[in-house]
Amino acid sequence: MEKNKIYWKDAVMMLNSGTELNNVEIDFNNEQIEFKDVALLNRNGIRVPEEYIYYNDDEIDFSDDPDITDKDFETGKLVWNIKATLPIDKELSDWIKKEHVDVDKLLIKLMRDFYETIKDFPKKTAL
């Protein structure tokens, strides 16, 4: 079955009015499409090629995004994630694989234990 070809702006208007778009091909006409329209099209199963997507951070309304506070981290609502690259030798790599070590959990535990130990040292103690 042949798909009906419609202009992207018409597709946006139809979607905004509640019309479902079935069996259609979208004509982007090599135009830049604002991110809000791209989001609407994507939510309705229409993929917009990357080269047609336009957005300007200054034009995006972030007013409904809540501010991040220290309390968010204190309560655990948000957590910091650190990504690190650790060079390891073959022996250690083999051990990790053999023992099915969850490296992320191991590093978190090691860092927490180190922190708890070091904060109990008197300030004048040299490491």
Image (cartoon, rainbow, N blue to C red):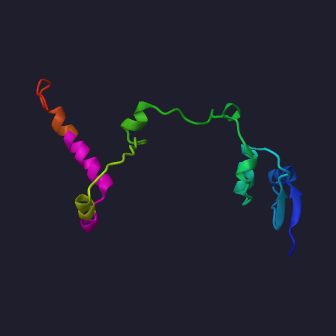
Q: Position of residue 87 (x, y in %)?
A: 31, 50
On whether residue 101 falls in the magenta region, the answer is yes
Rendered residue at 63%/34% (across/down): 62
Q: Position of residue 90 (x, y in %)?
A: 26, 60
Instruction: Tell me: residue 51, above or below residue 73.
Output: below
Residue 75 lies left or right of residue 106; in this view the side is right
Rendered residue at 22%/61% (across/down): 91
Rendered residue at 52%/32% (across/down): 67
Rendered residue at 71%/55% (across/down): 42
> How many circles with numbers are drawn on the protein?
0
Secondary structure that dominates the magenta span: helix
Given residues 54 and 113, the one toward you in this image is 54
Looking at this view, name the residue that lies furthest to the top. Answer: 124
Image quadrant where one finds the C terminus: top left
The stretch in magenta equals: 97-114
Q: Position of residue 111 (x, y in %)?
A: 25, 43
